[in-house]
Amino acid sequence: MSYSDEDYDRLQKAGKRHLWMHFSRHGSYDDSHDIPIITKGDGMYIWDAKGRRYLDGLAGLFVVQAGHGREELAEAAAKQAKELSFFPIWTFAHPNAIMLAERIASYTPGDLNRVFFTTGGGEAVETAWKLAKQYFKLTGKPLKTKVISRQVAYHGTPHGALSITGIPALKQMFEPLVPSTVHVPNTNFYRAPEHGDNIDDFSIWAADRIEDAILAEGPDTVAAVFLEPVQNAGGCFPPPPGYFQRVREICDRHDVLLVSDEVICAFGRLGEMFGATKYDYVPDMITCAKGLTSGYSPLGAMIASDRLMEPFLQGDNSFAHGYTFGGHPVSAAVAMTNLDIFEREDLNGNVRRNEGAFRATLEKLLDLDIVGDVRGDGFFYGIELVKDKSTKETFSDEESEKLLRGFLSKALFDNGLYCRADDRGDPVIQLSPPLIADQSHFDEMEQILRSVLTEAQTLL
């Protein structure tokens, strides 16, 4: 939808005066810099208030799996809202929550059959940590409260989830946070020179750092390990071969719960309903959100094993935790319809059939001096930018600021590509398109990236 100049100006003034945007530098939006206002989405593309079209290379925010503008999903929401617009699942239930929980459980690995609904990913992570603590209290191990996660990993913004997050810059202004979190090295093989080309040795080394942390803290005090199948922050770090199998063994040895944080990786991002299936491991809990509804309505979940539910089936025990809008009837209806689309159109299969082509197309950019690494899996990739390709030298904080926020973010958008240029870790560009993408979209991304990155090389 395109707005007239008068209406556009009114939106800009109102937005700058009243809308507090998330993770935004509001000082950047002065009289000469407009807020990007997105008004429409259709398939792989979005449009702004001036009528300009952009390829959505990030699926909104790793969310819009089925693509934009799906009338079927909008109609599912409207139909449910007319029938039952809201009811909580606090000691009550409604059919959509029941049927969706059953359906999600049918996709999970192992015995993860218990679905606790939230409204988003951060809430799902909060839920998983609280469940781990109460589970161990109910089973006679009350000291097991600590969490281990990875450096540079992002797990959400609520206080507990932020404590688990391994990005110091996101945490400092909110300290003191929830205590009892420990961070270990991640799986960024590109930044592991001591292992050379031996990724198998690196896999063992990275997993064993988790055991070192458990032993250092004391196994009787550690409740859980939180890991993403492919770590998002830092630029899409996939697990090296055998990593999760070794982590599973370590957790079992010390009676520590393994939480697979799949807020991004679940529901097709890696070509499977769950990343744990992709990498052949069975966690004790899965946290998820985003792609469950393709973003057409807010919904998240914590999925737990039957073993974790068992103490709550005894006597008057209760998990004293919940959210007003968790399992919302409209969101659950949208999720059911979204999963219908997944199955009918084989969205997971589309990712598996095209992930090699996506990687190969992005790897063409390795001929640019500024591109150091292309990494990821499925439809989830990061492109790491470097100052010196031969030494892997990264940019200084000032250079990164100039490169990412001073040029790349705006230049990529102005050239018709919505993606993410970020420096949580080393400077990266992230790409995570809707699961309906094909070679024509990969080519369009590569061409825009090549043009903008070629220009970026001349700036520093």
Image: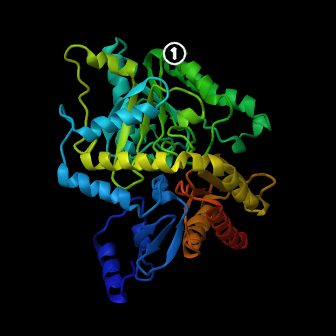
Q: Quadrant of the N terminus?
A: bottom left
Report whether 405 appears left or right of 137. right
Question: Which amino acid is tagged 1?
Answer: His
**30 w.r.t. 275: above or below:** below
* Percent x, y of residue 119: 32, 45
**393 w.r.t. 119: above or below:** below
In the foreground, 153 or 395: 153
The answer to which quarter of the image holds residue 164 is: top left
State the colouring used for the structure image.
rainbow
* Percent x, y of residue 5: 37, 88
**73 w.r.t. 269: above or below:** below
Q: Secondary structure at mark 1?
A: loop
Which residue is the extreme one toward the top?
Answer: 140
Q: Quadrant of the C terminus?
A: bottom right
**114 w.r.t. 395: above or below:** above
**Residue placed at 55% from the left, 61% from the top?**
57
Would residue 320 be seen by someone viewing this image from the given angle?
yes
Which residue is the extreme one toward the front?
Answer: 344
**Residue placed at 39% from the left, 27% from the top?**
113
**Residue placed at 52% from the left, 42% from the top?**
153
In the foreground, 430 or 49: 49
- Which residue in the structure is indicated by mark 1? 254
In the foreground, 88 or 131: 88
Would residue 235 be seen by someone viewing this image from the given angle?
no
Mark 1: give few (<14), some (14-19) or many (20+) Cα within 10 Å: some
The answer to which quarter of the image holds residue 300 is: top left
